[in-house]
Image (cartoon, grey):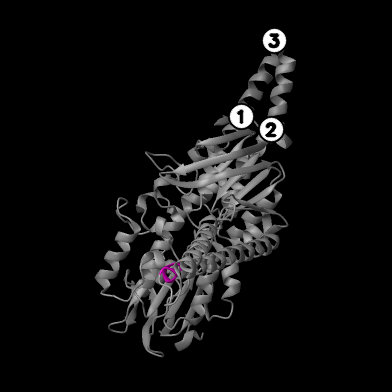
């Protein structure tokens, strides 16, 4: 494995990351196989694929955070990454995070000051040193770095207080601080993993504009279909393919969708053709085997010579059929199963809950009056901090209001797909957690985890501590659906989920007999659910009657 890196100095138009025949195996599972790609200045790539297919692993390899098992990686230029988690140890502040992000610019300005002093003192060689320092500072636009971070903090609604301890910020606030720092630092190459998580509508608009204006190279792994449509032109699809290698599609989002559909259709047809041929040969071999048995018991009146001749021909035919069957292999792998919405019956028109103007100090200021019956649909919108997740927690019974009340019908089942992954024991497998959950529910009709289409058998048997965030979220969704609730609450349901699953989930929501409440910033999902009754928490107090009318 060959890995060269030089990503501490800006390279401008020469910046690149080049991967050649890269392979990565985690445990006994191949995650990346034969990856060839080049990220150059001016290119905008999307990493797409089902959860657990290696998008984050590929980003780590590109950034130098993970060494591949084989293959070569070369890098030139500065690289900016945004992790989902930000170190909040000891007393680090927002200002500390900013200083780390713009270290190159701060160092360039210090070097320029020292070179200026040497020039003023008339030291030998000071002219060349000053010219070089000025060139570095100009390339980085170092004088403006701090202001760029301030603009990004404001654009993403992140904490602008440089003295604020990171440990006192919410997960979403910490992520927005980190994203603002990287955008403000303006590295040559940006590698972003789910950058739209924790962003509201204004933050999404700001991020989209920043990425479209980024002069360097860009790779985005995201569930946000609108973002990828707006900012990326080349798609690296890591889903299983007939060749076993990633598929590359040009012509933007629409080119990827159409190309992927055509490739999948050819794959399914090739697999079906091989299966049909294998079944035909199997039947032919079985028929030959039956004739072979019969040939040893000819009818009365046949002579010994005739019996021997007939037997020899039958044996030859059997051997020929057996050889044909042996030579024929189903070499095309079976396309992976897709998620299907599970069916359960909830009586229509039964009242689930009534919100009587609940509020929570500092978290939900807008009182909402709404009645939800089985079969109802409700969409919650509003900026970060408006109280959407708080209202959902009140509905689910995980939080009590400071004023107003929530009346829930006795015996109803409410299931919540929250933004946060449950605190599972990382040593346990998905199958163990799911089966224990189903047993506790007493739902003997619940499908096995691997048959839900949410997790393949290999992933289902993996310890949750080794699952990707997307796989853990799929497990969480499987647990919610196994409860067969009267009310299904989905808080940012597209976070970490693949496009194919989101599309199937969206289709299922339209036909589910239970009541469904969705809170989301996802622009494509908002378009898909545009016909749903909506509560917008940016507006004045709302009154909503049964069936979500308001």
> In the picture shown, does residue 85 fall above or below 128?
below
The residue at the point 47 percent across, 72 percent down is 340
Residue at the spot of label 2:
11
Q: Residue 395 or 250: which is nearer the viewer? A: 250
Q: Residue 33 or 212: which is nearer the viewer? A: 33
The residue at the point 50 percent across, 42 percent down is 24
Magenta highlight: main SS: helix
Mark 1 secondary-structure assignment: loop
Disc marking residue 406: none
The residue at the point 69 percent across, 42 percent down is 216
Q: Is residue 423 left or right of residue 64?
A: left
Q: Residue 468 or 102: which is nearer the viewer? A: 468
Mark 3 secondary-structure assignment: loop
User: Marks 3 and 1, how far apart in space?
Assistant: 31 Å
Residue at the spot of label 3:
123
- Asked where in the image residue 232 lies, by quadrant, the reply is bottom right
Q: Quadrant of the N terminus?
A: top right
Mark before the other along the chain sequence, 2 or 1 = 1
- Which of discs 3 and 1 lies nearer the camera? The answer is 1
Q: Residue 311 or 412: which is nearer the viewer? A: 311
Image coordinates for residue 169, horizontal then vertical, percent: 43, 51
Q: Which residues are magenta?
A: 292-296
Q: Is residue 181 left or right of residue 113?
A: left
Mark 2 secondary-structure assignment: loop
Residue at the spot of label 1:
6
- Which of discs 3 and 2 lies nearer the camera? The answer is 2
Tell me whether the residue at label 3 lies in contact with that at label 2, contact meaning CB atoms closer than 8 angstroms: no
């Amino acid at each position: 494995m060959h890995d060269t890196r030089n990503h501490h100095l800006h390279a401008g138009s020469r910046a690149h990351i080049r991967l050649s025949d890269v392979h990565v195996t985690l445990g006994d599972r191949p995650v990346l196989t034969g990856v060839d790609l080049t990220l150059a200045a001016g290119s905008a790539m999307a990493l797409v694929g089902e959860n657990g297919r290696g998008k984050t692993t590929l980003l780590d390899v590109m950034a130098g955070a993970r060494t591949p098992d084989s293959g070569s990686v070369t890098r030139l230029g500065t690289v900016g990454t945004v992790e989902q988690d930000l170190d909040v140890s000891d007393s680090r502040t927002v200002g500390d995070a900013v200083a780390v992000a713009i270290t190159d610019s701060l160092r360039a300005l210090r070097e320029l000051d020292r070179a200026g002093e040497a020039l003023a003192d008339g030291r030998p060689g000071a002219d060349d040193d000053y010219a070089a320092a000025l060139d570095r500072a100009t390339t980085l636009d170092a004088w403006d770095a701090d202001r760029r971070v301030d603009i990004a903090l404001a654009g993403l609604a992140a904490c602008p207080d440089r003295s604020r301890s990171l440990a006192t910020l919410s997960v979403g606030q910490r992520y927005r601080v980190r994203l603002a720092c990287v955008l403000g630092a303006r590295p040559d190459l940006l590698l972003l993993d789910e950058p739209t998580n924790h962003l509201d509508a204004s933050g999404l608009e700001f991020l989209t504009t920043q990425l479209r204006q980024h002069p360097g190279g860009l790779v985005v792994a995201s569930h946000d279909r609108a973002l990828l449509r707006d900012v990326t032109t080349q798609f690296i699809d890591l889903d299983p393919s007939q060749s076993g290698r990633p598929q590359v599609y040009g012509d933007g989002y629409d080119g990827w969708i159409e190309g992927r559909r055509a490739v999948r259709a050819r794959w399914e047809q090739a697999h079906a053709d091989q299966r049909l041929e294998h079944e035909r040969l199997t039947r032919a071999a079985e028929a030959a085997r039956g004739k072979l048995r019969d040939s040893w018991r000819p009818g009365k009146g046949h002579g010994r010579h005739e019996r021997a001749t007939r037997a020899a021909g039958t044996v030859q035919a059997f051997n020929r059929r057996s050889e044909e069957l042996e030579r024929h292999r189903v070499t095309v792998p079976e396309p992976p199963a897709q998620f299907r919405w599970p069916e359960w019956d909830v009586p229509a028109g039964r009242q689930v809950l009534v919100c009587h103007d609940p509020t929570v100090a500092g978290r939900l200021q807008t009182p909402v009056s709404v009645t939800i019956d089985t079969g109802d649909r409700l969409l919650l919108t509003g900026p970060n901090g408006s109280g959407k997740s708080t209202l959902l927690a009140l509905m689910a019974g995980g939080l009590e209001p400071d004023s107003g009340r929530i009346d829930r019908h006795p015996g109803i089942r409410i299931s919540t797909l929250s933004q946060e992954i449950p605190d599972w024991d990382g040593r346990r497998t998905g199958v163990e957690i799911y089966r224990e959950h189903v047993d506790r529910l007493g739902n003997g009709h619940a499908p096995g985890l691997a048959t839900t289409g949410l997790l393949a058998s290999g992933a289902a048997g993996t310890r949750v501590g080794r699952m990707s965030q997307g796989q853990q979220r799929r497990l969480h969704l499987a647990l919610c659906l196994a409860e067969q609730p009267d009310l299904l609450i989905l808080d940012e349901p597209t976070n970490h989920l693949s496009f194919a699953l989101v599309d199937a989930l969206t289709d299922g929501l339209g036909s589910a007999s239970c009541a469904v409440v969705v809170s989301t910033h996802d622009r494509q999902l908002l378009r898909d659910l545009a016909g749903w009754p909506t509560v917008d928490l940016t507006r004045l107090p709302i009154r909503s009657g049964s069936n979500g009318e308001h």
